[in-house]
């Protein structure tokens, strides 16, 4: 009709705009700890939200049926909400669950693992084992500080990656770090900003253990004054300082040489097994020393190794499981992809006077024709990276290994591999989470598989 001016038509299926603030009620938690609610018929994930809360959330990503957001304004708080200890929580992308009580964090992780096992494998373990728990804060013995040179302003930014961004949040505290590393961060950040060669810095890695370790990666040569300043700070904190101006083989200890590296390597200990492990800065070691000790103890208990049994330790690293297995009386064949790490593990075995180990370097993603896999084997321990060990577990099932202990840092790939083993007649006897990363949604777990009904459960 001429002159008719109808109202603008509402399009319920149109996605929300990036940056838009939306108001909603949260109903439950997702497997990664985000709150879940609904807005205009769409499922909304709210980072930082808790069930029962009324919130305004800022849209980060939007699709037709699903919206991802970040808590913007808390309208009605859950009685469970607690104040985060870290001053950087609003920006830092590291610890996403500090607003949640520890018991609730554990419940989220337990449910995430159970849901993944059910979804991907249709499995329920015969026994759920108690979680391995360490300190809620002051536990982390590895961290990396990113750096960015702002040429326009002539300043060096030092910190952690911001949540959902490549920008940095500059830190002056990090309460999840072990105290020795947190105090080192507080002193190191202003020092890095003052160095003559600050524009050529890459990043810094800090590691704990028997004593703190500073590894500075840099793209330009450091002046004598810069080196002296770094060494003075390291001495003040009882740390060693290492430099890496290029590829990994350029790494050297400050005021040292390539020849004397192995006379002064960093180290950590497993006190219950009376073992000491040396490592190079940049090597993988477990981030949580207390939970690592409990994890090793539990692995030995669940496998119940008898003296003389043949055991494969796959993804062995510097020997974190291999040496305790040998100490328990096993004949261990340990395999790792990195030849450098294999040498470190071999040296650690020798330094701890352990002889019943054989170390090999091999690509564990392609195990089909591995000679070491053809050897007799009573039990296997594997600790794969996040993408799991799909081909490897099928080869182990073909071999009909009696007991397989799977240490996982990713519930989804653990569930996938568990389904493969279950399809080949293995029983998931017991499983439990290991809270290696409190205040975060990371889920670590240990699972014991036993071949069929012919093998007596451990």
Image: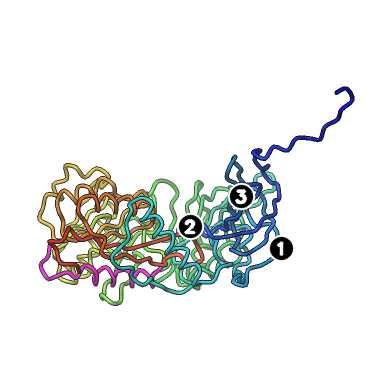
- Residue 301 lies within the magenta run: yes
Find numbered disc 1 in the image and state the secondary structure of the residue it sits on. strand
Label 3 CA crowd tier, 10 Å (few <14, some 14–19, many 20+): some
Q: Quadrant of residue 185?
A: bottom right
Residue 284 % position (x, y) = 36, 58
* Closest to the observer, 228 or 428: 428
Identify the magenta region: 288-310
Residue 20 % position (x, y) = 70, 47
Q: Which mark is residue 167?
A: 3
Q: Which mark is residue 31?
A: 2
Q: Which residue is mark 1?
A: 75
Residue 22 in the image: above or below residue 267: above
Location of the N terminus (image quadrant): top right
Residue 340 % position (x, y) = 28, 52
Q: Residue at x 15, y 61 (%)?
A: 453
> 196 left or right of 338?
right
């Amino acid at each position: 009709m001429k002159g008719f001016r109808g109202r603008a038509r509402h399009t319920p299926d149109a996605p929300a705009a990036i940056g838009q603030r939306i108001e909603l009620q949260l109903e439950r938690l997702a497997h990664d700890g985000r709150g879940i609610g609904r807005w205009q018929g769409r499922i909304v994930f709210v980072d930082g939200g808790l069930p029962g809360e009324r919130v305004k959330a800022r849209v980060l990503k939007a699709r037709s049926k699903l919206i991802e957001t970040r808590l913007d304004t808390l309208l009605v708080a859950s009685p469970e909400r607690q104040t985060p200890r870290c001053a950087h929580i609003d920006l830092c992308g590291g610890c996403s669950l500090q607003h949640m009580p520890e018991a609730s964090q554990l419940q989220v992780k337990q449910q995430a693992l159970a849901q993944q096992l059910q979804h991907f494998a249709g499995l329920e373990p015969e026994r759920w084992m108690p979680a391995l728990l360490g300190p809620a804060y002051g536990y982390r013995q590895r961290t990396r500080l990113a750096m960015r040179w702002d040429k326009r302003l002539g300043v060096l930014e030092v910190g952690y990656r911001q949540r959902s961004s490549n920008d940095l949040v500059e830190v002056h505290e990090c309460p999840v770090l072990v105290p020795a590393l947190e105090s080192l961060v507080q002193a190191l950040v202003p020092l890095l900003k003052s160095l003559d060669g600050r524009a050529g810095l890459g990043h810094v890695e800090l590691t704990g253990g028997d004593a703190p370790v500073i590894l500075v990666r840099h793209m330009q040569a450091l002046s004598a004054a810069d080196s002296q300043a770094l060494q003075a700070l390291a001495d003040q904190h009882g740390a060693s300082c290492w430099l890496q101006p290029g590829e990994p083989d350029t790494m050297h200890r400050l005021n040292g040489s390539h020849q004397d590296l192995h006379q002064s390597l960093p180290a950590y200990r497993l006190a219950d097994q009376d073992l000491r492990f040396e490592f190079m800065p940049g090597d993988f070691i477990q981030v949580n020393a207390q939970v690592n000790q409990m994890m090793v103890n539990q692995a030995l208990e669940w496998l119940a190794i008898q003296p003389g049994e043949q055991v494969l330790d796959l993804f062995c690293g510097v020997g974190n499981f291999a040496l305790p297995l040998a100490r328990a009386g096993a004949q261990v064949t340990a395999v790792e992809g990195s030849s450098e790490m294999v040498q470190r593990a071999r040296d650690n075995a020798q330094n701890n006077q352990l002889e019943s180990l054989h170390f090999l370097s091999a690509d564990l993603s392609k195990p089909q024709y591995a000679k070491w896999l053809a050897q007799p084997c009573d039990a296997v321990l594997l600790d794969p990276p996040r993408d799991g060990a799909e081909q490897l577990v099928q080869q182990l099932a073909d071999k009909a290994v009696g007991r397989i202990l799977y240490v996982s840092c990713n519930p989804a790939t653990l569930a996938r591999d568990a389904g493969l083993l279950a399809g080949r007649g293995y029983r998931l006897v017991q499983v439990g989470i290991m809270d290696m990363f409190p205040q975060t949604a990371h889920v670590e777990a240990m699972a014991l598989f036993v071949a069929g009904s012919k093998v007596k459960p451990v």
